[in-house]
Image (cartoon, grey):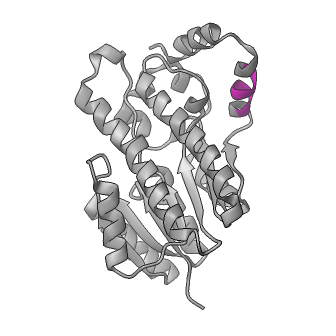
Amino acid sequence: MTNKTALITGASKGIGRELAFIFAEKGCDLLLAARSEQELVRLKELLEEQYGVTVHTFNSDLSLPDSAQQLYDAIKNEGIDVDYLVNNAGFGDYGAFADTSWERYGNMIQLNIVSLTRLTHLFVTDWQGRKAGRILNISSTAAFQPGPMMAVYFATKSFVLSLSEAVDNEMRAAGITITALCPGPTATHFGDESKMNASQLVKNVQIADARSVAMLGYRSMMKGRPVVIHGAMNKVAPFVVRFLPRRWVTRLSAQVMKR
């Protein structure tokens, strides 16, 4: 029997890397996409040697226009059918909205929203006649409220959550599921790269390990759950904010996100 195949974006580090190991442990072949070509090659060699699966790597910067289409076309040109899509690639940036360059925000929106949406659309369109296909979109607990000092990042994750829930509802009759995974602060390179480690949020909460977040995402995707939040305490805030005035929610978020 032919192995299933999973495409994972942002696969060279953090949650994406852990998901690559989990899929490989389950005997799934892999398509790994990221900007870090050398790290991808090392990961490919490790996974193939350790688990005997077939791994293809794609050096792809999904923050660039048309990169999602180019990645999809490259996979199709290899004659590979994808069974699972994990939209993990993304980044954030900590700082006042006006103090961050538009280039940084443009790349963030392209990666976190445009490429994720394009890949989701490409694959659900491809899968419609198959009555099968699962997508895991990495959102965040940031999706449930505005985020002063990370305004654009929080907004992009709200988009991912909303899109995933809506498309999941539309596609279930076609046998396709979309799961939005919403982790809180996680032990990855994200905190350093985004400068989020300077915030009170990271300093005052327990940091999750990437493996446990990835495992929850994998299991939830396989069960077809629409939304899953990692961590018991992380489930409290999304529940509470439903009952508070939006102005209060934004002020509370600003307090949590301050340096």
In the rendered image of this protein, does residue 180 appear above or below residue 29? above
What is the count of numbered marks? 0
Q: Main secondary structure of the magenta part?
A: helix
Q: Decide which of 85, 24 is in the foreground and name it.
A: 85
Question: What residue is rendered at 51% in x and 58% in y?
Answer: 86
In the rendered structure, the answer to whether residue 221 lies left or right of residue 85 reads right
Question: What residue is rendered at 49% in x and 72% in y?
Answer: 82
Quarter of the image for residue 218 reads: bottom right
Question: What residue is rendered at 29% in x and 62% in y?
Answer: 70
Question: What residue is rendered at 36% in x and 44% in y?
Answer: 111
Q: Decide which of 86, 234 is in the foreground and name it.
A: 86
The answer to whether residue 30 is magenta is no
In the rendered structure, the answer to whether residue 56 lies left or right of residue 51 reads left
In the rendered image of this protein, does residue 246 appear above or below residue 103? above
- Asked whether residue 32 appears in the rendered view, the answer is yes
Q: Quadrant of the N terminus?
A: bottom right
Query: x%, y% of residue 74?
Result: 31, 71
Query: x%, y% of residue 95?
Result: 36, 19
Quarter of the image for residue 150 reads: top left
Magenta residues (range): 235-240
Q: Quadrant of the C terminus?
A: top left
Query: x%, y% of residue 139?
Result: 55, 41
Task: Single out the residue that lies furthest toward the bottom.
Answer: 1
In the rendered structure, the answer to whether residue 33 lies left or right of residue 81 reads left
Query: x%, y% of residue 242?
Result: 73, 21
- Asked whether residue 35 appears in the rendered view, the answer is no
